[in-house]
Image (cartoon, rainbow, N blue to C red):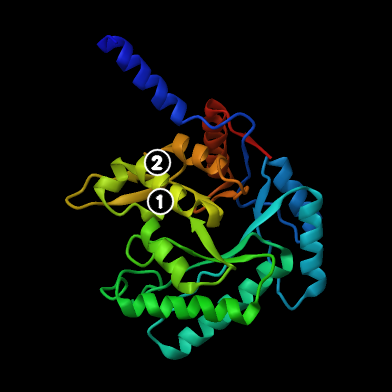
Amino acid sequence: MSNVSRRALLLASAAGAAMAAPGMRIRLGGPIFLKSDDPRELAREHRRLGYSAAYCPQADVKDAVRTREIEKAFAAENVAIAEVGAWKNMLDPDPAARRENLRYVTERLALAEAVNARCCVDIAGSYNPKVWYGPHPKNFSKEFFDATVENCRKVIDEVKPARTKFTIEMMGWAIPNDADSYLKLLKAVDRKPFAVHIDVCNGISSPEKFYENAAFIKDCFRKLGPWITSCHAKDLDWLPEMNVHFVEVIPGRGSMDYRTYLSELARLEQDAPLMLEHLKTAEEYDEGKRYIQRVAGEIGVSFY
């Protein structure tokens, strides 16, 4: 085989690897800006925007009537409730704050179960006393790992969810920070309702991972695929300074390999939603959405 022919074959193989199989679909969602508390109006607004997944609307798990209305309204529009965010520090160094945070996270998991969300999501937390998600030298310690296992078990065992999952996001400076550490955590927690929430940008913590993010994405999906319940859609840019500084940007304005991200997501047996987040305006979300839709179209991925 000539060098030219061999090169052409390699390029064709690489292009094929980034393409999803025919008929593969994903769910895309994001925040909406409609001023309404009516679950039916909210669900229809998601559909109007081209979304088939949603963040859980404001609700209290104690309000059984509203949680039933939310579940029914979103199911009627075929809009999956992707996640209920908890976003509290389960490892707060202050014991009273930690107890209160765990109570809140448990309540949020119960809400996810009540509305039939795909998952309740939090991060493991941090021993940082000032920033609840901040860095700390003990965030990679055995103490941190063991406490996270205990916290996840405690929350799950309190709620005993049958329909939803409890998940922990990766962070660049706390466990879990990559696919292998997440696998270790899954095994240690040893609870069927414990699953995986993917935010690949959160796992990018070095120049190597930044430049080779397609390989990082593939590794996450290869090792964690069966447990993935929901994902976040962001992008990262590198601001040139005297030290490494990555910054979140609108999808399409950074360097994350969305061809790989979307094709890996589309190959999952389960339809784990992809949720836009951390943008400021409806216009920014629309830009990110259109970019994801365009890339999906290029690789043969469609939407529910």
Residue 203 screen position, x and y as percent? 37, 55
What residue occupies the far front of the structure in this picture?
1
Q: Residue furthest left?
A: 242
Q: Is residue 182 visible?
A: yes
Q: Are marks 2 and 1 in contact (CB under 8 Å)?
A: yes
Identified by mark 2, the residue type is: Met
Element at label 2: loop
Position of residue 160 measured from the top left corner of the image (x, y, whole percent): 65, 76
Residue drawn 35% across and 50% down?
Answer: 247
Query: Could you say where residue 35 lies in the image, as x and y percent from the top left?
Result: 71, 56
Q: The disc labelled 1 sits on which kind of residue?
A: Cys
Going by the image, does 292 lie left or right of 207? Answer: right
Residues 146 and 139: in front is 146
Identify the residue at horizontal 25%, vertical 46% (top origin): 208
Seen in the picture, residue 293 relative to 100 is either above or below; the reply is above
Disc 1, SS = helix
The residue beneath circle 1 is 201
Residue 111 position (above or below residue 217): below
Count neighbours of disc 1 (C-alpha within 10 A) and say few if under 14, some if 14 to 19, many if 20 or more: many
The residue at the point 64 percent across, 31 percent down is: 23
- Viewport quadrant of the C terminus: top right
Q: Residue furthest bottom?
A: 96
**Residue drawn at (50%, 87%) of the image:** 99
Residue 57: quadrant of the picture: bottom right
Left-right relation of 142 to 161: left
Residue placed under numbered mark 2 in the picture: 256
Instruction: State the count of labels.
Output: 2
Between residues 262 and 60, which one lies in front from this camera angle? 262
